[in-house]
Image (tube, rainbow, N blue to C red):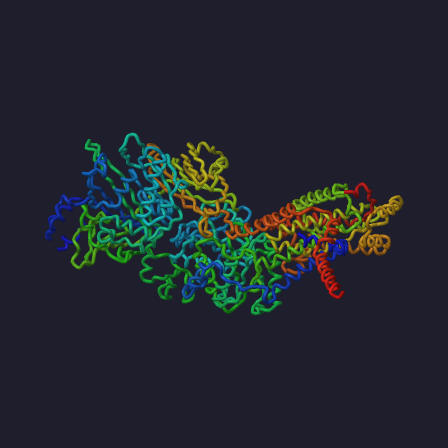
């Protein structure tokens, strides 16, 4: 204790406290910078680890895979028939597929959903094991690009037939043919856990197949694994998939990396996958879902396998991936629990775990907390009572902005178009300039609004970063420019000007920082003020949650056009129960509204000595 | 001489013929010394090329007088064919009857119809045990039951020793026995207790002691077929053992034990036969592919045909060995029957390349080994396997599944589907582990077929015994009436309790199993049980802590306690002064001051020396 005491006295003696307070904005920026740097160094040698199979029971590729030779003939036989069903209605197509499945003893049922169409599924009961667990092989009839998944469907039926001959299964196998990989598949998974009569026990893992070409050969496999709301499948399942794919001699692509970049493994290639990974993780469910997202939320580990390109490997090689994966999963005596649930892949066989990447998001939320502190103490009004009207009004405004945000989130969820939202967002940004000289708020209120805004944002991002790291990092980064918005103070009116002098004279300990402020206030010219207002305007536009996310989508993801992303955020909630929309509306928007309010012109206020005593 | 070797006889009339034709003298065997033992095998082809094989074994013990204690000096115990292990066990635990079931697999009621023996011999997945124990009170009954379960656990190499209070229920109407059990002491009562272990894997370990209980012990007769590799390589299999006490009513107060054992299995014939040729189901040769010629077909593509509908099946192919001999000492010969559709199926018994047939497809095996010692074989042939003898449709289809997600709560959904023309009355029995905290208030009855229905019309009688933590499971027993042609869905919600640290299984597990629900269908007139069926078991995932967490907690709390202690200690032993005071004191007593003093002292001595 004595040591700390001494240190504290030393700090007081040197006058570090006011200096640090004066430097708070810089510290906040440094925190954010630290966050970005700490994530940018992850792809450097020594920062990441090689993946490994943590659960010894899995043993991927230890058993020889037999989906080959004449199974190919059978697959072609089925494919020639499936090709004829492209233009049929889903009922006709499902009936044909259902009759084929029944031929080898699969129990089939059709789940009907008025909104999302029919889903055919079949349960193959395990000859070994107690039938309480299941593995799912899901095949959407049309993949995420709306192409007919002819290869996937023929693989699905021929694999199911192949599996039915094997006596080794200790978990039931469920084959699912849904109309599409998003809402239709999701509604089936939901129904499986609420209302279906034919069930096969709790689903442990799911593999979604996407092979949309009718060709026999393909080039490489893309593995998609991002779940909804920040959930990822257990790293063991992803590792099993990757290890099997590489064992069969194919190359693995992550996050849509093209074929010519698959061999690279240097800092920049790893950095690219890292950034793409964070983007896809944050926007998972908003982007076109691959199918594995549908299983998120019921402790089901799932991946999507997608075949790309022409030539190279034959379609049975692709079929051997789910075969070997099912053999591995079948070995499991426990749930998937051994390996990581939170990780970032840098290359198919390299990853960083949560302890390595989490500090960056923590640093970002600390940056907001420091900004909040800055708005609280780094001005003339640090000493006003905690229960002064400014604080209470700020909290009230926060409450109102929460209500407004909630109303906005609900309104645009169902009724209003995205274009309107963007127009309003943009228009609102101009309010401080348009109303300059007409509407004023008091200066302490402006600071208190900022204080509450950043504190709220920091809390949101802190609570988000454990469960949805990518989202926390994304909104933290996009919203960070908000901290640069400065309070515009105009010269106080005549009567308050006179009292300003007395105000300053009251101050007992005028320190450097206050003198600086004083100087700044006195020296501020009309021109400077206008420049600051323009700067505030551009920062406000940039950090509006809707504008910001749209710009981000347009710049960094070629899937989105125009205001697409807003509609997709909304439909992600409606179809898939992905909360990204609410994170933006209820996490980010209230903070932005408070900052908007704080950027109105403000008048300085005399602080009475009575208030100061607290 | 064939007549003396094997007989394919019909009815008891020809049994006499066996005795007459037998020329080999049977030394020392007197007709009166034939033992009460009966074994039969029934083969029943099912749709989809499946085959049901039902083995039945029946035994009787020597009569005994329950009034004479086994400890009295003139008492003696005489076991003939009855297993030596059972009577002392029944005696010491005052058990009047017990029923043991080992079942595994999925019974496809939709295509196979009713379970064999009206479902009364098939348990839920895993091990199931129920017994009728005579005791003065429930506590004593439980002690006896516990002892019985422990002994059976040793006898059958199963985990029945895990049966404890938290797994035992006292069924009220379910599990009613067809035969009345005697009460040896009028001051005591009979208690029916039941427990099941749903996650118990059934394997050869359980089968071997089971076969050893039978007098032929796998050496002759039907038990020679029973092989773990074949029995457990089936779609569904069930081993059951029932022991009952039967007393004669004619005044001499003699009782005897009856034992009934069943082994039932359903197997897919084409895969079982293919397994003999190719142990690993590798892809077929291009030449042996069976393709649909109506669809595009060449050396690259082939639309597969379903399994062939002709079959030629030998029992020795299914079990990799023939039946060795008859049962050798029973009062009735070993019997094999086939329940087939006569228009397309034929059944034969083959002995030494000679084939026999009867017109009711039942065969009795003589005790004399055939000349070459090759044993008996049974042949089933069919030109169209899709034609089978009609299966009895099940009175009701019941499916049960878990609903909801999350670690803290869930729900159970049971769907009843009655497609008969008459309503079905049934007893729904469910035993839920104590960590499933059921909200009976959330019980809902819905129907997709009829819109307005009242819960009380469906559930006519409700019995519910709440679970007590670690003491007893929740016990639901509903009498229900499912209307004709209707789908009724019963749902209820529950909370998942947290377990104590030591109650978790050693490693992270795949979940906690919930017992199957037992559905007893009652006959509409007499309310007697006519059919029994069980749902599948369920897998419940409880929130499992990270078991390294306790150490983190210990480290953190220790650190905090250390800090608090340090502060308190400082407060208690140190004087509190202001900073100015402290500075003054430091000036006169600090380390610096002492050094200064020392320096001064040294200098002073130096000075004096100089002086």
Asked whether, in this view, residue A610 is left or right of residue A312, the answer is right
Asked whether, in this view, residue B547 is left or right of residue B601, the answer is left
The residue positioned 21% from the left and 56% from the top of the image is B375
Residue A570, horizontal then vertical, whole percent: 63, 50
Query: Visible in this render: residue A93?
Result: no
Query: Visible in this render: residue B505?
Result: yes
Asked whether, in this view, residue A175 is left or right of residue A9, the answer is left
The residue positioned 53% from the left and 46% from the top of the image is B406
Q: Nearer the viewer, residue B208 or B398?
A: B208
Q: Height in image: B255 above or below A441? A: above
The residue positioned 28% from the left and 34% from the top of the image is B180
Where's the C terminus of chain A, which quadrant?
A: top right
Q: How many marks?
A: 0
Residue B120, horizontal then vertical, whole percent: 32, 42
Q: Nearer the viewer, residue B364 or A414?
A: B364
Residue B167, horizontal then vertical, whole percent: 40, 41
Q: Nearer the viewer, residue A586 or A187?
A: A586
The residue at the far front in this view is B611
Res. A165 image quadrant:
bottom left
Asked whether, in this view, residue B124 is left or right of residue B545, the answer is left
Residue B62, horizontal then vertical, whole percent: 20, 41
Res. A560 image quadrant:
bottom right
């Amino acid at each position: 204790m004595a040591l700390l005491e001494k240190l504290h006295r030393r700090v007081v003696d040197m006058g570090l406290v006011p200096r640090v307070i004066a430097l708070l904005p810089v510290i906040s920026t440094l925190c954010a910078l630290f966050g970005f740097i700490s994530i940018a160094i992850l792809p450097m040698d020594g920062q990441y680890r090689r993946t490994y199979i943590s659960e010894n029971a899995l043993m991927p590729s230890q058993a020889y895979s037999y989906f080959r030779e004449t199974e190919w003939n059978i697959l072609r036989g089925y494919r020639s028939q499936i090709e004829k069903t492209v233009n049929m209605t889903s009922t006709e197509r499902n009936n044909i597929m259902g009759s084929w499945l029944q031929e080898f003893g699969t129990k089939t049922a059709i789940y009907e959903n008025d909104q999302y169409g029919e889903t055919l599924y079949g349960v193959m009961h395990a000859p070994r094991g107690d039938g309480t667990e299941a593995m799912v092989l899901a095949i959407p009839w049309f993949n995420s690009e709306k192409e007919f998944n002819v290869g996937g469907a023929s693989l699905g039926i021929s694999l199911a037939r192949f599996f039915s001959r094997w006596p080794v299964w200790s978990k039931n196998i469920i084959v699912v043919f849904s109309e599409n990989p998003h809402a239709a598949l999701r509604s089936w998974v939901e129904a499986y856990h609420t209302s279906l009569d034919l069930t096969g026990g709790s689903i442990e893992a799911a593999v979604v197949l996407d092979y949309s070409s009718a060709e026999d050969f393909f080039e490489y496999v893309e593995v998609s694994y991002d779940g909804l709301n920040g959930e990822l499948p257990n790293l063991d399942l992803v590792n099993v998939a990757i290890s099997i794919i590489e064992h069969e001699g194919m190359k693995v692509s992550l996050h849509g990396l093209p074929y010519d970049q698959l061999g690279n493994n240097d800092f920049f290639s790893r950095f690219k996958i890292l950034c793409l990974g964070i983007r896809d993780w944050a926007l998972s469910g908003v982007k076109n879902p691959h199918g594995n997202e549908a299983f998120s939320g019921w402790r089901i580990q799932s991946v999507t396998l997608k075949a790309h390109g022409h030539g190279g490997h034959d379609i049975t090689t692709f079929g051997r991936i789910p075969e070997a994966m099912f053999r591995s999963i079948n070995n499991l005596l426990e749930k998937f629990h051994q390996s990581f649930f939170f990780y970032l892949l840098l290359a198919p066989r390299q990853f960083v775990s949560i302890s390595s990447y989490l500090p960056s998001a923590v640093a970002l939320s600390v940056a907001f907390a420091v900004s909040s502190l800055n708005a609280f103490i780094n001005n003339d009004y640090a000493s006003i009572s905690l229960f002064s009207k400014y604080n209470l009004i700020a909290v009230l405004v926060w409450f109102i902005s929460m209500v407004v945000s909630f109303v906005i989130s609900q309104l645009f969820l169902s009724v209003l178009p995205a274009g309107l939202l963007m127009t309003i967002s943009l228009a609102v940004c101009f309010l401080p300039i348009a109303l300059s000289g007409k509407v004023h708020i008091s200066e302490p209120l402006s600071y208190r609004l900022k204080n509450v805004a950043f504190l709220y944002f920091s809390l949101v991002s802190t609570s988000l970063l454990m469960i949805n790291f990518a989202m926390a990092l994304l909104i933290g980064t996009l919203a960070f420019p908000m901290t640069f918005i400065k309070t515009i103070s105009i010269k106080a009116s005549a009567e308050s000007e006179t009292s300003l002098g007395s105000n300053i004279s009251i101050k007992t300990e005028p320190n450097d920082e206050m003198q600086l402020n004083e100087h700044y206030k006195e020296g501020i010219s009309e021109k400077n003020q206008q420049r600051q207002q323009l700067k505030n305007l551009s920062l406000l536009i940039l950090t509006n949650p809707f504008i910001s996310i749209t710009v981000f989508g347009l710049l960094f993801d070629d899937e989105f056009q125009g205001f697409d992303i807003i509609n997709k955020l909304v439909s992600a909630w409606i179809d898939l129960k992905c909360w990204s929309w609410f994170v933006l509306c209820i996490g980010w928007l209230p903070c932005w509204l408070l900052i908007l309010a704080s950027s109105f012109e403000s008048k300085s206020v005399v602080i009475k000595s009575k208030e100061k005593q607290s | 001489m064939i007549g003396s070797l094997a007989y394919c006889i019909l009815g008891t009339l020809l049994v006499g013929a066996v005795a007459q034709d037998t020329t080999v003298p049977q030394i020392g065997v007197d007709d009166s010394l034939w033992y009460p033992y009966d074994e039969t095998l029934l083969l029943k082809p099912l749709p989809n090329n499946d085959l049901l094989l039902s083995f039945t074994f029946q035994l009787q013990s020597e009569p005994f007088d329950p009034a004479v204690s086994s400890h009295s000096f003139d008492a003696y115990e005489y076991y003939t064919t009855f297993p030596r292990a059972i009577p002392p066990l029944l005696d010491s635990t005052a058990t009047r009857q017990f029923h043991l079931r080992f079942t595994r697999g999925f019974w496809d009621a939709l295509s196979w119809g009713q379970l064999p023996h009206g479902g009364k011999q098939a348990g839920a997945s895993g091990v199931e045990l129920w017994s009728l124990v005579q005791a003065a009170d429930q506590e004593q009954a439980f002690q006896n039951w516990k002892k019985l379960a422990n002994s059976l656990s040793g006898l059958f190499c199963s985990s029945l020793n895990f049966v404890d209070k938290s797994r035992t229920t006292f069924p009220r109407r379910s599990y009613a026995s067809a035969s009345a059990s005697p009460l040896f002491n009028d001051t005591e009562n009979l208690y029916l207790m039941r427990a099941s272990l749903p996650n118990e894997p059934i394997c050869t370990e359980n089968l071997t002691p089971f076969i050893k209980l039978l007098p032929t012990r796998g050496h002759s007769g039907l038990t020679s077929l029973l092989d773990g590799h074949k029995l457990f390589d089936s779609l569904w299999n069930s081993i059951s053992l029932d022991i009952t006490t039967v007393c004669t009513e004619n005044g001499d107060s003699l009782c005897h034990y009856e034992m009934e054992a069943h082994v039932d299995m359903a197997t897919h014939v084409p895969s079982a036969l293919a397994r003999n040729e190719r142990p690993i189901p590798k892809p077929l040769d291009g030449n042996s592919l069976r393709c649909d010629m109506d669809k595009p077909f060449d050396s690259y593509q082939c639309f597969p045909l379903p399994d062939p509908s002709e079959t030629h099946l030998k029992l020795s192919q299914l079990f990799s060995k023939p039946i060795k001999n008859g049962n050798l000492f029973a009062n009735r010969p070993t019997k094999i029957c086939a329940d087939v559709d006569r228009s397309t199926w034929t059944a034969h018994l083959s002995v030494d390349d000679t084939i026999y047939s009867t017109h009711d497809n039942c065969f009795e095996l003589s005790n004399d080994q055939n000349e070459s010692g090759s044993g008996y074989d049974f042949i089933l042939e069919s030109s169209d396997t899709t034609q089978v003898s009609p299966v009895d449709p099940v009175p009701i289809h019941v499916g049960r599944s878990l609903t909801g997600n999350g670690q803290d709560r869930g729900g159970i959904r049971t769907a009843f589907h009655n497609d008969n023309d008459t309503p079905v009355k049934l007893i729904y029995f469910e035993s839920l582990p104590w960590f499933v905290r059921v909200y009976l208030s959330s019980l809902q009855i819905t129907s997709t077929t009829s819109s307005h229905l009242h819960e009380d019309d469906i559930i006519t009688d409700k019995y519910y015994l709440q679970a007590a933590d670690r003491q007893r499971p929740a016990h639901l027993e509903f009498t229900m009436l499912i209307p004709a042609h209707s789908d009724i869905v019963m749902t209820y919600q529950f909370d998942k309790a947290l377990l104590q640290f030591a109650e978790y299984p050693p490693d992270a597990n795949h979940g906690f199993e919930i017992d199957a629900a037992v559905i007893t269908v009652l006959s509409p007139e007499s309310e007697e049980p006519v059919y029994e069926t069980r749902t599948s078991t369920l897998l419940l995932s409880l929130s499992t802590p990270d078991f390294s967490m306790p150490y983190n907690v210990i480290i953190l709390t220790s650190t905090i306690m250390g800090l608090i202690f340090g502060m308190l200690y400082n407060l208690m032993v140190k004087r509190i002064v202001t900073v100015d005071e402290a500075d003054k004191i430091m000036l006169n007593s600090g380390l610096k001051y002492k050094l200064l003093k020392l320096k001064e002292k040294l200098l002073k001595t130096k000075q004096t020396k100089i002086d």
